[in-house]
Image (cartoon, rainbow, N blue to C red):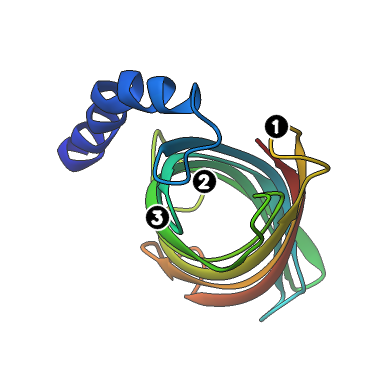
Amino acid sequence: MKKMLSFILFFIVFLGDALHAQCKPGNTDSLLLTLDVDHVFSIRNKGMSMHGYDFNFGLKHKRVELFGTYERMSHHLGKDGVKTYMNTNTLGVGVGYDIQQNKKRTSFTPVRFRMAWPVGHPDWNNNYYDLSIHHIHAANSKAIGLNLGVGFRYVNSRSELSPNHGFVYWSVGIAL
C-alpha cells in the first residue's frame, strides 16, 4: 500500500509540469495528460466472466505512457447452477507504448501492460496482470476519442473462493 501511495504522490507532484506542457499541444516533446474511462467485459472461462469499469490516469511523453488505474469489477461465477457475484475494487500501475501514431495525433494504437491490487474489503481477494492493445481515434487532437481494446488478464486468486483465472476481454470507452 505504501508503494501505491508513493506512486499517487508522484503523479500529484508532476501534475503542474504536465498541465504546463498541455498549453503547447503543437510540441511533440511535451508531456500529455491522459484519461481513459472504459467498460470492460469478458467471455466465460472456467464458469466465470467479468464486467466492470476502469479509469486510467497518466502521463505520456512521445510514445511512452505511465498511468495509474482504478477499476470496479464484478465477477460472475456459476457453480452447481447457482450464480455468485463477487465485486472487487483495485488500484494499479501500468506502462504503455504506441506502436502506431499518426502525425496529427488523432489516432493511437498503444500496447499496455498493467498490474493491480485490491483495495478495501473485496468479495474476492485477487491481484491481476494485464496485457492489452487499444485503438484510440479522435476527430482532432483536442477532441474526445473512442477507445476500443482487446486484452488478456491473468487473475491471481488469493483466496479459496475461486481458483486463478485467465480472461480474454474487450473494452469500449472514451479517451481524453
Residue at (18, 34) in percent of width and height: 6
Asked whether 123 or 104 is in front, the reply is: 104
Looking at the rendered structure, which numbered label has been put on residue 95? none
Asked whether 159 or 136 is in front, the reply is: 136
Residue at (24, 22) in percent of width and height: 13
Q: CA–CA distance between discs 1 and 3?
A: 24 Å
**Which type of secondary structure does the marked residue at label 1 adopt?**
loop
Q: Amino acid at mark 3?
A: Gly
Decide which of tag 2 and tag 1 comes sooner along the chain: 2
Residue at (71, 49) in percent of width and height: 106
Numbered disc in front, either 1 or 3: 1
Q: CA–CA distance between discs 2 and 3?
A: 24 Å
Query: Which quadrant, please, contains the C terminus?
Result: top right
Is residue 87 depicted above or below 155 in this figure? above
Q: Is residue 78 left or right of residue 94?
A: right
**Residue 71 placement (x, y as % from top left):** 55, 43
**Residue 42 placement (x, y as % from top left):** 74, 67
Residue to which mark 3 is pinned: 94
Query: Which quadrant, please, contains the N terminus?
Result: top left
Q: Are marks 2 and 3 in contact (CB under 8 Å)?
A: no
**Residue 131 placement (x, y as % from top left):** 51, 71
Dividing the picture into quadrants, the one containing residue 80 is bottom right
Residue at (76, 43) in percent of width and height: 145
Q: Are marks 1 and 3 in contact (CB under 8 Å)?
A: no
Residue that lies at the very extreme toward the bottom in this rendered image: 46
Residue to which mark 2 is pinned: 123
Q: Amino acid at mark 2?
A: Asp
**Residue 15 placement (x, y as % from top left):** 34, 23
Q: CA–CA distance between discs 2 and 1?
A: 40 Å
